[in-house]
Image (tube, rainbow, N blue to C red):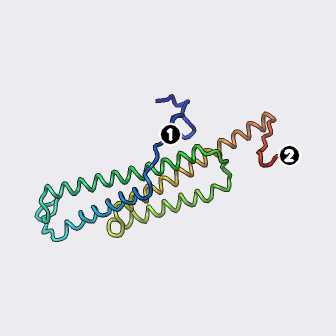
Amino acid sequence: MADISELTPFGREPDFVPSKPLGKRQIAKLAADCDRLEHLVSRSWVGDRGRFDLSPDTLPFEKWTALLDRWHISKLKYGAAIHARNLFIEYKAETSTRAVKSSDRLPLESAMYEAQAHLDMIEANRPDFAAERELTDANAAAVHAENLFEIAKTKFDIADRQARADKRNGIRRFRASHVHRH
């Protein structure tokens, strides 16, 4: 691992490049599998007479634990796919050469607060009105929106510090689009 002074402003090693995430179709298939297994787990309790505390009467214990295991693995795969997708988008934002403007703050901040409000609503209504996958989606969206806001803020702060240093040193920088050629 690199020394902390060698890390990027975003806390990553300089040679970090995330792997390409799964496509939308593949992620949708993982989501559908996760939802289907959650539905099967939920349906297993229908008709339960309460003889056992940790498993339903409707299935043999081995089948019940196998079903729970499959559901758990599907949740892990789905969560990993969502994380990989978000990490790739965040990496692209970190390495983008586009200058961050102060006007970018409001849309990013609004998206961050909206994602957090959605997560709060999902958490408040679980498990009656939201599936486990929806909670995973809402949590990932909230973290992702906050990360994008922090990336933009960091890039803006770096540019602002550079502009102040340039001003102190009498350096004037011009953008190519503002230079008139005759």
The percent coordinates of residue 162 (x first, y second) are 70, 39
Callout 2 amino acid: Arg
Any mark on residue 6, and which?
none
Disc 1, SS: loop
The percent coordinates of residue 44 (x first, y second) are 20, 65
62, 140: nearer the viewer: 62
Q: CA distance from mark 2 to mark 1?
A: 38 Å
The reply to whether callout 2 and callout 1 are in contact (CB within 8 Å) is: no
58, 92: nearer the viewer: 92
The percent coordinates of residue 79 (x first, y second) are 38, 52
The percent coordinates of residue 146 (x first, y second) are 52, 52
Q: How many marks do you count on the picture?
A: 2
- On screen, residue 162 versus residue 91, left or right, reads right
Any mark on residue 181, and which?
2
Residue 2, above or below 66: above
Callout 1 amino acid: Val
* Mark 2 closeness class: few <14, some 14–19, many ≥20 residues within 10 Å: few
Residue 39 occupies quadrant? bottom left
Q: Which residue is mark 1?
A: 17
